[in-house]
Image (spheres, coloured by chain):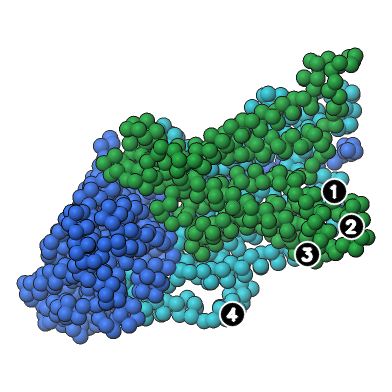
Chain colours: A cyan, B blue, C green
Amino acid sequence: MTKYLARRLGQSLLTVFLTISTVFVLVRLAPGDPAAAYAPPSATTADLERIRAQFGLDKPLVTQYGIFLRDLLNGDLGTSYSFHDSALSVVLDRMPYTITLSLAAIAVTVAVAVPLGVWMARHADTSRELGANVLTITGQSMPDFWTGVMLLTVFAVLLPVLPASGFTSWSGLVLPTVTIAILQLALVSRLVRREMTTALASPYITVARSRGVSERALTWRYALANSSVPLVTAVGTRFAALLNGVVLVEVVFGWPGVGSLVVRALETRDYPLIQATVLVTATLAILVQLLVDLAYPLLDPRVRLGKAA
Amino acid sequence: MTRTPPSETPSRRTLLRWGAAGGAGLALSPLAACAGPTGAPGPGTLTLGLNRSLVSLDNKLNQFDAAVTVQRAVRQALTAIGPDMRLTRVLADRFEMTAPTTWSVRLRDGIRYSDGRPVTVDDVATAVRLYGEVAGSFILGLFPELPEVEATGERTFLLHTREPVPILDRLMANILITPAKDNRPEELRSGVGTGPYQVAGANSGAGEYTLARVPDYWGGRPPVEQVRVRFVPEESSRVVALRSGELDVIDTITPDSAEQLTGLPGVHLEQTAGVRICQLFYNFRKPRGHPLADARVRRALTYAIDGESLVRDVLTDSAEQARGVVPLSLQGAERTGSYTYDPSRARQLLRSLGADGLRIKIIWESGEFAADASVMEAVAEMLKDVGVRAALQQFEPGGDILKWRQGKGGDWDVIGNGFPGTTGQATTMLQAMYAGTAEDERTGDAFMGYVIPAIARQLSDAATETDPATRDRKLAAAQHAVWDTWPAMWAFVPKTVLARRARVDGVRLLPINSYDLTAVRLEG
Amino acid sequence: MSATLTPSASSARSSAVTARHLARATATRQRRSARFKLWAGALCTALVALPVALASLLPLPDPDAQNLAGRRVPPLTDGHLFGTDQLGRDLLSRILHGGQVSLTVGILAVVVSGLIGIAAGSAAGYFGGWIDTVVSRLLEAQMALPLLMMLLLVVALFGPSVTVITCVIAIAQWPEVARLTRSLVLVEREKPYVAAARLLGMRSWSVLGRHVIPNVLRPASLVVLLLLAQAVLLESALSFLGAGPQRPFATWGRIISDGQDYITTSWWLVTLPGLVIALLVVGVNLMGDGLRDRIRTTKTTKPAKGA
């Protein structure tokens, strides 16, 4: 177990390290100039050189990378050009908003998808299931930014019942959450449906049924409990993918999270901020994945870590 | 599937339950502090929705015109640009030119910062020095040179310059005064000022601020108790939020937003002539012999642009066609001519100059001015009608276009460019655009390669002229000379437009796109 | 998956199983629902893809032809079926011509990601060892990262051309193909014909290329439709965020993001292009789903997990 954990942690660290290094090189190779994006339009070439020197961009790439690594070891991700503040703390300030939105979206998705998936399993291969299936696929097929704009038009413009943007009250959470949930619904409900069908056909269900356990208890307590493992795995694995949707939805709804932050960091070529955003989100996604893997044996006693899984 | 030992079930269920509860707690806790009970602003709170993030309330590095309103509410300068571009004295009650290079200034009596400290001459001297020490300052570019401060008394001092800077009193409106002890050569993220408001809460990462009234502000108590500043990047969201009353004021709105908001109950629009000029500027680095190096060809192309229709249909009347080389609302601006639409004349002139079948490349950066992409697509279509094929290249923000502007990125013919008139003075803008020298051009620093020595001489001569009447005459002559070189295919001056809820009163929008928060009242 | 018995379809024999029973059997119902999805999917796809493909032949105004006097005309007026946009251009024509760019990018991206994915996945599955380690690690890493952020970065950094966008989407999608191919090759590798080919002295590259890959191509190609759906969505998301090909090229994402400024006055500018995207993607997704269901019912073996 400890050995497994050590190996997994090592792998995760390596992934994060390679990612951040790739991003480091990529942003510097690409066109665009932080000094030019930062300076006023009247800046002269000499001004720009002064700014570049101030940002440490006048040094060779290898030296910059060395400095970056040294600072990284000290937990310093540099100073954001546009915020004039530690890039890490700017990202961490925004992080709660993104996490809140992601968790709320996961909660809503699970709350709808699990009953729906169970219902679909109970009515497997009927036209009713087909209908539900087509409906969720439709949800999955709509561009999420478009769904967002549409919801915004209906609920903030036509019937102004919800705020259009930002986070000034909890009601501001509703539209972005629903937008993401619509996209995720198909995958999760289909997964629940599949696992439930397998579980409901298992011998232990037959045994329980023969002992007089009610159908209701069979579905919810026996079958669903055993389907929870793949469900947790799927939600954990999809966390990274979920963050994709979050970027777009944050932009549409002006949500002050890291998604809208990274769009802005790109516009200003704010290298430290881009690096910090990627580092923090990658770490988060990998951490969630790791936690899910570690939760495996706790959730399902049949699984032992370190063995072929 | 094997059976599950009964003892395992509860522990697993407990785990799941804990997980769910923990997740919910984790989800809600971090923001509980940030979220108010409702989204709508309270009766005594004014909520402003800015479309750019206000990183701090200092202006040493970040400067966009709409931020001035909020910055001035906390920190003030010696002077300010008031209505009709007139100078108003703020922290100084005397600001006079005593010799061409010397100004005598006296601080207003009894002015204190919001924490009770008095304002001293040293604060001014430190501020001027520190503005000069930051790299990449917008403000620094406005000053031909920074003045030296010489204290002559407790409240009086002299400002010295090497060359005459006749508009120094106006330029000093951009230097915000902070206690010398707390001032640094960087963007200040906290601290106090002399303004009517102080910062009660800030989340600068998200661009959100709460300002509270200073109880004993020297200029009298402002009517609005609290001001909330929010950062709402999406234009459509700002419009929706204003409609629903989430926001009270949105500034710098696009023509389309203005059109959508016109006539809505509870919403009022304020507009004034602007000080920004948006030009389709020609590339002045074309080799001799290239059609665009010929002023006659540049002029012929202007006839292809249906400016009236662009202003009416694309910019929905929220702009005016330029009638000079700088916006006419600037002090010292001169009306020099106007753009006319005559496609047949354009075709005929181009043919006679041997420039028919011309292909040009138009470049611009997204967001350079409102409706930029629509204007460019419309212009390309108009050029097609006179037989000129235009290729469009839109740059995403990121500083890449600067290389092109300096002639180091690639070849182009026309650039869409907006230029701000922050100081309210024509001379600042004229100097920046048309006074390029061969030496500037060696590093690509002349504005779009515009180097015409005679005009540069005329402009710098005017800029150091201390007699106002003579200065205006010299400036006017220079502007006519610039117009005759046909520097732009088309140009327009966007109006400054702001939308407010009906309950907000007393917003006196200035052409420099800001207003005095102390004059704003809330009704109801 | 259910282990249902598939009864032989001959209805002539005497049996307790009546035609009615057969019609209600799980397998029949599954087949029927798969067929429904296939047909409905094909219909939706054709409804969008055919007009897009034939856009230049249809009697439509030029997508760039402006009429500043007829700006933002609502649908079904003045011969504009979908109305006009902020410069008075025919919206239907722009959507169809824009669809050509979006669809081309989508199809190209699927081809490129398919090639990369099949090459990397089959090499990893067949050779194992360090190749497998490297490929698997890459797959894992990419699954764990918030990809859109990275893609946005790459497009923003290298400029939004059709080539860059195609490559970026291909990079986003190759893991899906690689994972599937790898698992298929792992199974295929152990089959006798591979051993036979080896014994006959064929080199491993040619065994892989001439025998193994052709055998996994069909099952692997199943994901193509699902990938195409994703690619179209991804392309529109990128151009929505400003990372689309140069103007005046219309792409679906850009039409929506341009129209977003007019949501309170001109609903059609955002609603209609979005509906068109959704219709196409629903169609492609339904077809993909139907195909997958059909394979599943005919095989009745539990396929590899794949979402």
Residue at mark 4: A62
Measuring 41% from the left and 80% from the top, which residue is drawn there? A50
Q: Amino acid at mark 2?
A: Ala
Chain hosting mark 1: A
Q: Amino acid at mark 1?
A: Val
Q: Residues within 10 Å of mark 3 (few under 14, many from 20)?
A: some
Disc nearest the viewer among 2 and 3: 2
Residues at circles 1 and 3 in contact by the CB criterion of under 8 Å: no
Is residue A110 found left or right of B31 in the rendered image? Answer: right
Q: Which mark is residue A303?
A: 1
Measuring 34% from the left and 46% from the top, which residue is drawn there? C65
The answer to whether residue C47 is visible is yes
Q: Which mark is residue C131?
A: 3
Secondary structure of the residue carrying numbered label 2: helix
Measuring 23% from the left and 56% from the top, which residue is drawn there? B304
Instruction: Give the CA distance from mark 1 to mark 4.
Output: 45 Å
